[in-house]
Amino acid sequence: MRVLELFSGLGGWRCALGDRGRVVAAYDVSEAANGTYRLNHGQEARARELATVPPRELLEHGADTWLLSPPCQPFCRMGHHRDLADRRSRAFCHLMDVFREAPPERFVLENVVGFLGSEAHALLSERLRAHGLHQLQLQACPSRFGLPNQRPRVFIVASRKPLQPLPQPGLSPRPLADFLDAVEDERLYLQGDGHLRHHQGLDLVTAQDQRSACFIGGYGRRFVGSGSFLKTARGIRRFSPSEVARLLGLPEGFQFPEALSLEARYRLLGNGLSIPVATWALDHL
Ligand SMILES: C[S@@+](CC[C@H](N)C(=O)[O-])C[C@H]1O[C@@H](n2cnc3c(N)ncnc32)[C@H](O)[C@@H]1O
């Protein structure tokens, strides 16, 4: 596979791809994402606003596969559900125009469950049908892949070849203890009583638990509904970025540029893919 990785973030699709193919170009508008991508994958992602990349440029890469995770806010429960009218859908609409002119052989899109039934979903399905691509609509959560983390997602998998849905592993989640850092970072402990106001709404887990809530981009700034907090003998703390990375199934040793703030690290992880789930989605191709 010659892959265009679009909205590449920290490179989750690339991790899931493994040696099945080669990323011929990656695109993301965020400097923080691209710095992290460079550090871990040794390749530059193009710092471009995808809505304005000329179709010729995208086609010149000679990719036969598009892997993409467009921004989910237009389809999120917590967003305004503005769908294609949301300005963050402009790049997706542009890509659908490029697709109409020159569709790839294979295509996989990941998004939140709210994408199903959206106008964007209808537009994509229409494009896939018009070009005779077979398509599957998959839903999966890492909690069925042995990971103690909730992150239900939708994958639209399409190919020129007929596709068959594959079973999910159905593994029980391992305890959170397996994903914790050997040495705790003291700074992650919630200080003072600021958090006590939110205490009742906090999703608290212990190292023995086999679950954690979905970590979102705002985990570094918000308390309630942003992910789980770990209760230890010493108090209550955030999960560290490397712990969240392990819960997403990113490779051990995944790094962030040193200068990147804690908040920026959580933001990138909150946008990221669960790698075992994305790998399973790619297995369908
Ligand atoms: C849901 S995240 C994708 C995460 C990625 N799959 C990963 O593994 O980290 C969406 C990404 O798209 C980028 N993005 C959003 N709008 C964009 C646009 N118009 N052009 C290029 N990149 C964009 C964001 O910076 C963000 O990194």
Image: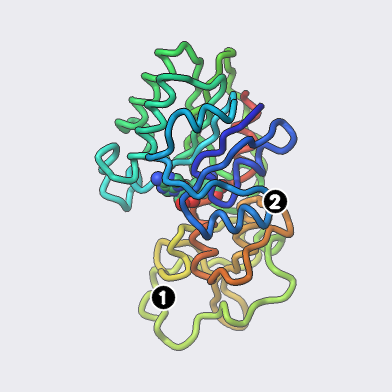
Q: What residue is rendered at 53% in x and 71% in y?
A: 261
Residue nearer the viewer, 205 or 105? 105
Residue 143: x, y in percent?
A: 58, 46
Q: How many marks?
A: 2
Q: Could you tell whether 193 is left or right of 187 in the image?
A: left
State the CA–CA distance, disc 2 to disc 1.
Answer: 42 Å
Q: What residue is rendered at 55% in x and 28% in y?
A: 60
Q: Is residue 156 visible?
A: yes
Residue nearer the viewer, 275 or 203? 275
Query: Label 1 sits on what residue type?
Result: His
Query: Label 2 sits on what residue type?
Result: Gly
Q: Is residue 191 above or below residue 72?
A: below
Q: What residue is rendered at 55% in x and 75% in y?
A: 237
Closer mark to the observer between disc 2 and disc 1: 2
Residue 75: x, y in percent?
A: 34, 42
Q: Could you tell whether 130 is left or right of 205 in the image?
A: left
- Kindly check if marks 2 and 1 are in contact, taking CB atoms under 8 A apart as contact: no
Residue 198: x, y in percent?
A: 38, 75
Q: Find out if the beta carbon at label 2 lies less than 8 Å from the nearest ligand 1 atom.
A: no
Name the residue tied to disc 1: 199
Residue 178: x, y in percent?
A: 72, 60
Sequence order check: which comes first, mark 2 or mark 1? 2
